[in-house]
Image (cartoon, coloured by chain):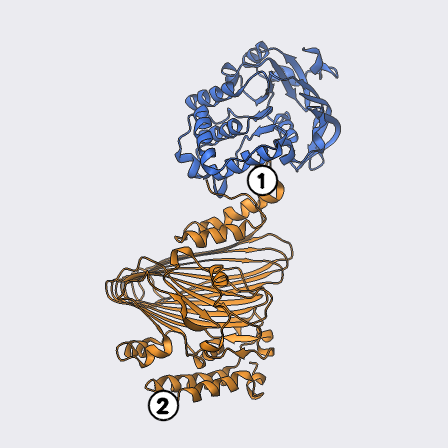
Chain colours: A blue, B orange
Amino acid sequence: MLEIKNLHAGIDGNEILKGINLTVKKGEIHAIMGPNGSGKSTLAKVLAGHPAYEVTKGEVIYQGKNLLEMAPDERAREGVFMAFQYPIEVPGVSNAQFLRLAYNEKRKHLSEEELDPLEFKDLLKERAKVVEMDASFMTRSVNEGFSGGEKKRNEILQMAVLEPRLAVLDETDSGLDIDALRIVAGGVNQLHNSENAIILVTHYQRLLNYIVPDYVHVLAGGHIVKEGGKELALELEQKGYDWLKTAEPETTGAGAQVR
Amino acid sequence: MVTEIITRGNSYHEAFRALQESQPDSPGSWLTRLRESAMESFQELGFPSVKDEEWKYTNVAPIARIDFTPAKSATTANIGSDDDELAAFEFVEAKHSQLVFINGQLRSDLSSLTDLPPQVVTMDLSQAISDERYGEIAWRHLAQQADYVANGFTALNTAFISHGVFVYIPKGITVESPIHLLFISEGAQTANFPRVLVVAEENSSATVIESYSGRQDAQYFTNSVVELVLKDGARLEHYKVQREGTRAFHIATTAADLGPNSRYDATTITFGAELSRHDINVTMDNEGAECWVDGLYLVTAGQHSDTHSLIDHRKPHCTSHQLYKGILDGKSRAVFNGKVFVRHDAQKTDAMQTNKNLLLSNEARVDTKPQLEILADDVKCAHGAAVGQIDEDELFYLETRGIHHDLARNLLTYGFAEEVIGKIKIESIRAQLDKAVLNRLNTSLEA
């Protein structure tokens, strides 16, 4: 589904990703872990197409297409979704308006009939159960005045509505209390199936107690320095990241070796 | 001052003489005198120039240069009687509480008032003036709020008062249907002088919509003056929808006088005309009055919109809130000049003023000047202005949800305007605005 080859990228002329290799197949859950500043969020943003980040080398093939040539909205309609670490507030646009518009953009793209407000309301009600969200959130402006946990739940609600093939969740666990974490993780688990794939970007192992990854990749200094199964996350929890910081990057193509 | 136009013996003069001679020594002869004195005032003032501080950013020389012909009496303009043409300008909520004006002149034959309570009076202004019952009320209030001695445009309008409208809401009456004053300009090169006097008696309640439309391709000049008098405890909701043709000149004054404990809610929507200027003056000369003065101006390439507001707190315990938002696209220009004046006696005033502008193009320009002048010492006042562009992070966020770039921009523009649009209580005005803001958007936004 996704193949990242020797990806170099940065912002304002500073290279942050220094040769990332990663292969994700459908049905898989990958965790990208690493200390602050390792490039985890940069990777997520590059995949979503953030205009501030520049890819200087390498390629990203998604569903057989060159992802890097696609505009962010195009990527989204093709099934790529990123849950933001800091979801943006959009004043004056209600959550329901926004979600219906986004949903219908995708339907149009797939040459499917658009849903009218009433039909969409039913769909939204159904999907909102995934993250236990109340109807009152739908008439409020997107993320405006939402608590940190509500914003993260709203991200997963968007994922539930848009049903992406590839979801990149950027630090979705940060700032969540234990109840919110359980709801958000439960939502992601409900949405995961054999046809889609999930990349979890996280600093802590905590989230992985709820969403169990098939593979764990550790990012440090813009390289993947360690890869393994879910047990690697536990090891990191015990040892921290420091012992890896000095480690040499794994040889090119390491991403492919784990499977 | 541009005075050449007067000495030239132009159409204004001829039309003015013709108007004066058509109604000699009628029972309303004070009106003839009022017009005479207003014309003298106009001759003295002329059209303002950019040297005048109040007109610094708005050059009305094009209006002065063109020899517009004041529209003749109402009966001669037979265009506009087409039902379909009219329907395009209607607001469904006011279909049967609608007064139609062609070139500023009331056309009773095109108006429908069946939804109004029988106590409500809507009368041709020239008729009201000579009316036994309402003449005195009209005389007491007409040309009292809108100052024709200081403002050339108001002077010119006052010199041409004839078939405007007098709206009278008697004591304690609540009018459910909005009263729509629908001004349509027909023909080209005409000057129209809409004139409105609304008197809302004690504890009455009503909604007035004032809308302006005209031919898209025609050059014409609308110069309107609306005076509103709210008595003790009266409530008036007022919408001004300016959707003139793209080559039109629109100069308007709204003057409201608020009685004790009255409440005035004004929303001004500006999206038409090549050049427009709106002066809105609210006088709070009685205790306990409250007003909301909101507005939204949407201009695109080649348009110029100017708003000047004056909220005059003269007595204690009055509240005023003002929110004006502007959206500028292409090579357009907008001016916002808002003055809140808190006089010495106006203790316990609560005044808030905000002007925010969204520039959608690098060629757009806005001049905003919120001003607070406070002479009382126990007041709560705040004001602010902002000019910004579409937020890149917000844009990216919407795009990552699959929303096309242009649609995302429109959606954010809509979100910006929503703070004003969302407060509009008349559904069809709101719908029209939604459409105007989301003009490139084919999807409806209901949800």
Counting from the top left corner in percent of width and height, residue A122 is at: 44, 31
Query: Chain ID for label 2?
Result: B
Name the mark nearer the viewer: 1 or 2.
2
Query: Is A253 rendered above or below residue B105?
Result: above
Look at 63% across and 25% down and name the residue there: A38
Counting from the top left corner in percent of width and height, residue A199 is at: 60, 21
Counting from the top left corner in percent of width and height, residue B392 is at: 60, 42
Q: Is residue B414 visible?
A: yes
Q: Which quarter of the figure is the C terminus of chain A placed in? A: top right
SS of the residue under disc 1: helix
Of A96 and B380, nearer the camera is: A96
Query: Chain ID for label 1?
Result: B
Q: Which quarter of the figure is the N terminus of chain A placed in? A: top right
Query: Is B293 rendered above or below residue A179?
Result: below
Mark 2: amino acid:
Asp
Look at 65% across and 17% down and name the residue there: A25
User: Image quadrant of residue A237?
Assistant: top right
Pointer 1 local density, CA inside 10 Å: few below 14, some 14–19, many at least 20: some
Q: Earlier in the sequence, mark 1 or mark 2?
A: 2
SS of the residue under disc 2: loop
Query: Is B126 rendered above or below residue B309?
Result: below
Look at 75% across and 17% down and name the residue there: A252
Q: Which residue is denoted by mark 2 in the rendering?
A: B25
Pointer 2 local density, CA inside 10 Å: few below 14, some 14–19, many at least 20: few
As drawn, is A68 to the left or to the right of B177? right
